[in-house]
Amino acid sequence: MIPYARQSIDEDDIAAVAAVLRSDFLTQGPSVAHFEELVARYCGVEHAVAVNSATSALHISCLALGVGPGDLVWTSPNSFVASANCARCCGADVDFVDIDPGTYNMSVGELHRKLEGARATGRLPKAVVVVDFAGQPADLAGVALLAQEFGFRVIEDASHAIGAAYRGRPVGCGAYADITVFSFHPVKIITTAEGGMAVCNDASLAQRLQRLRTNGITRDPALMETAHEPWEYEQIELGFNYRLTDVQAALGAAQFSRLDEFVERRREIAARYDRELSDLPLVLPFQHEDARSSYHLYPVRVRPESGLTRRGVYDALRARGVAPNVHYIPIHTQPYYRRLGFRDGDFPHAETYYRETLSLPMYAGLDAERQGHVIAALHAVFGGSNKP
């Protein structure tokens, strides 16, 4: 079975992890700082804070920006639930902004319309979590302009998008968002087994992110209230144990040396899909001229006029040894969010997209033979029919 995604681990990765296992530090050692430095330098950003998952990074990013009870956070319904849960974990209310039907990212036009309505009612969002779906950066400049006009903070959920670029600059550069978050889950572009990172250009935000990942504890004498003995530390706020281990960081640093190679291979795979699936009744991914995707996913949509359902194509591919996936079930349709009052029809573009989408196999280790099998399976499923 050809999976939709998988990690790519080589002997250098294994050697890097083994070296840490033989060292003095399995956690809270130098490997974490080294990994953070690599990512910060690549993105052209001042600060990077590694944590144990992108979910954790989103949570403490909300906290660092002051999100709390009574506040409102907006995000995209076309994302993993963590993009909304991060605000709920801070006690804030959540709402969603429908997607652009071409890019599947948050629609800036819809965001503007919704902000105008929120200003009229006197309840604007404290923050907007904008998602770079499938590796394609959102309209970050458009969101940043609205943030200036309406006074909200921006968290860029770039869990899919390390290695991507927007307007010629790396995603995470800090030009358009207060904080950008990356994921290093095994299905992502590089992996630390589990892990995430928050990057920013604000030193005070970075310091708070660092405290929040370590139980709210500081050893900075300038922040401590008691006598400053060399062994002392103080908990100055409520935080969490969200640390990344040195073992994981060593894997991440080794993987990071191949980031550009991984992304380039994904772009080659996407280009072949674009060429060889163009005659099928599928909507292939659109790439915006401002964005250079890292292609975490290759989502296609089954055209209704094909005569096939998404489920029918899904089952037929699996019967031919191909395991596609679906990204994402709209967050607002999950039972938890239905209990908060969201209903079908609230965000129609995200819902229509979900009913039609499949994520095809996309990972750096997908060789030409296996990709050819995926392409042949799709042609067989659609019977060689031409694109309408």
Image (cartoon, helix red, strand yellow):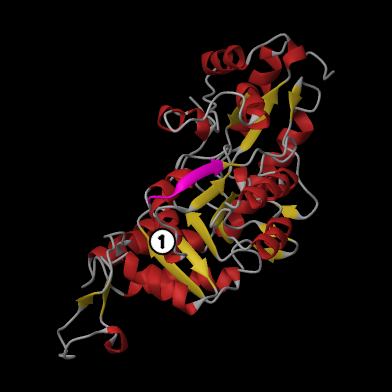
Q: Assign the magenta stretch its main secondary structure.
A: strand
Residue 10 visible within the image: no
- How crowded is the residue under tag 1: few (<14 C-alpha within 10 Å), some, or many (20+)? many
User: Residue 21: x and y, percent?
Assistant: 24, 63
Position of residue 192 in the picture relative to residue 219 (left or right): right
Name the residue: 52% across, 71% down: 40
Residue 70 within the segment the image draws in magenta: no
Name the residue: 48% across, 24% down: 1
Q: Amino acid at mark 1?
A: Leu
Position of residue 241 in the picture relative to residue 54 (left or right): left
User: Residue 263: x and y, percent?
Assistant: 62, 52
How many circles with numbers are drawn on the protein?
A: 1
Residue wearing tag 1:
63
Name the residue: 19% across, 79% down: 233
> Looking at the image, is 387 positioned above or below residue 174?
above
* Badge 1 element: helix
Position of residue 154 in the picture relative to residue 220 (left or right): right
Name the residue: 37% across, 63% down: 249
> Looking at the image, is 376 positioned above or below residue 266?
above
Q: Which residues are magenta?
A: 91-95
Residue 153 visible within the image: yes
Which corner quadrant of the image does residue 106 belong to? Answer: top right
